[in-house]
Image (tube, rainbow, N blue to C red):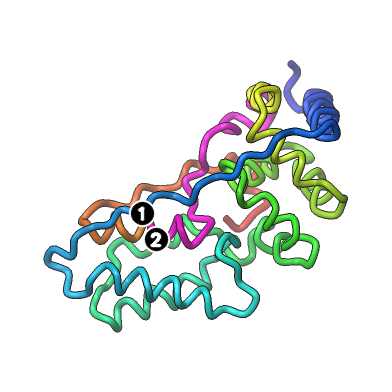
Amino acid sequence: MPNGSRLPIACCLGACCFWACFGVGVASAAPPAQNKAKPGSNKVPWAKIDATVNGYFSALPGHQASDMISRKQVEPVLTKLAVMGWKVPDQEKLLAKVPADSSWLVTNLRTPNGKKFMRKIAGYPQGYDRTDRLTALSDGRRIVSALIQGPGGEEMIAFLTTSRTGKNTSKELTLVPGGADFNKPTGKLYTVDALLAELSVLYAGGVSAPPAPTPAAKRARSSY
């Protein structure tokens, strides 16, 4: 498969569209399990931290539970927790795992059509991860833009994440430029549930793992 060629992507995505049009089954993903850490030496009970984070995001205008979050939304939450008595360790590492407000994916998912698309893909297994990976491929942003604007665009993400044929297509996409880790989680914190899971690890004394390396092609075009 020649490097730099768009033919493999076109072929793979052509297969995606074919299967999506004929009704791919969509499985709902359960929210990430939260580590119910015991307070230990922390002065603030975990239940209060959980309630504070959920309450903050619930109060944001127009925010829904599965919406993608961003760094400027998370920063005030960390300040609130510090005022309560728990200064979150490794804050810079944690914030580095949250999508930047200026990133291509965040800005496009906050448009009217983007929000509709976002809320449809949010329940698919690694729906955000797979969409994020897709934007890193050559011509990937044009493809995701078309999915956002066109009716039924979410069926492509459903196909890639929930069907056996789609998963085989995803393996093929790992061979195109920018797609080496296409099937792997990005390690980013896209949702409130993911943020709480990460905070619970830190609360229990764990260490924040870094996000997965960003492909060079994407680093040159994005503020992630």
What residue do we see at 53% from left, 56% from top?
A: 190
Vertical relation: 35 (above or below) 131? below
Kind of residue sitting beneath label 1: Gln
Residue 140 is a magenta residue? no
Q: Nearer the viewer, residue 221 or 57?
A: 57
Q: Nearer the viewer, residue 59 or 138?
A: 59
Residue bounds of the magenta highlight: 174-197
Q: Which of 33 and 92 is in front in this view?
A: 33
Report which quarter residue 80 is drawn in: bottom left
Say whether marks 1 and 2 touch (CB < 8 Å): yes
Horizontally, residue 68 falls left or right of residue 135, namely left
Kind of residue sitting beneath label 2: Leu
Q: Mark 1 points at which residue?
A: 34
Q: Name the residue under label 2.
A: 196
The N terminus - image quarter: top right
Q: Which residue ends up furthest to the left in the rendered image?
A: 41
Q: Which of marks 1 and 2 is nearer the N terminus?
A: 1
The C terminus - image quarter: bottom right
The local secondary structure at tag 2 comes to helix
**Percent of width and height locating residue 172:** 68, 22
What residue do we see at 28% from left, 64% from top?
A: 89
Vertical relation: 152 (above or below) 57? above
**Percent of width and height locating residue 103:** 64, 59
Instruction: Identify the mark at residue 220; answer none if there is no mark.
Output: none
Query: Viewer-nearest of labels 1 and 2?
Result: 1
Dominant secondary structure (helix, strand or loop) of the stretch shown in magenta: loop
Number of numbered discs on residues: 2
What residue do we see at 80% from left, 28% from top?
A: 19
